[in-house]
Amino acid sequence: MFEPVIQEETTGCGIAAVANILGKTYAKMKASGNAMGIYADDKSLWSNTKYVREMLSAAGARTSTEEIPFASWSTLPDLALLAIKHHQEEGKDFWHWVVFKRVDGKAFVLDSASYLPANIRTDFEGMQPKWFIEVMVS
């Protein structure tokens, strides 16, 4: 098994999610993001999908063009970015990024939140995804 990447900043879940998908460290993904003008302290990292898509694309990964409404865990693709903890602040949507993976038929979520007792999650009932972005890595 692998070691999930933990976000090092409160708003770093997008950077950590991309690191978890690409198998990179948080520091490397943060440096890559910074070089592209993407910074963890920018709140739009958790209110806009553009930044994670750009970071994944720069590494050669492809993503679905639209956010796809979540229907069930069983219908998710083998790799996806999920928006959980969806809420609104001053009329703007915000969420927490996590990564859904299915490996050899086993499904789990990589959640980068530093306060969790375990960052590889299978407590699917405890997460309520609103939508997802499919990710295809070559």
Image (spheres, rainbow, N blue to C red):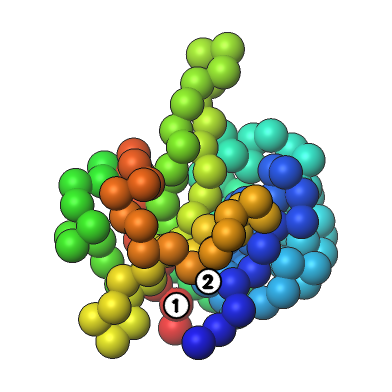
Residue found 19% across the figure and 47% down from its top: 71
Reply above or below: 16 against 115.
below
- Label 1 element class: loop
Q: Are marks 2 and 1 in contact (CB under 8 Å)?
A: yes
Reply above or below: 123 against 29.
above
Q: Dot 1: within a 10 Å radius of its alpha carbon, few (fewer than 14), some, or many (20 or more) residues?
A: few
Residue found 35% across the figure and 57% down from its top: 123
Residue at the disc numbered 2 = 21
Residue farthest front in this picture: 117
Residue at the disc numbered 1 = 137
Residue found 52% across the figure and 71% down from its top: 21
- How far is the residue under mark 2 from the one under mark 1? 8 Å
Figure quadrant of the C terminus: bottom left
Disc 2 vs disc 1: which is toward the camera?
2
Q: Quadrant of residue 52?
A: bottom right
Return the x and y of residue 3 as percentages of the image width and height: 60, 79
**In the drawing, does residue 36 fall left or right of residue 85?**
right
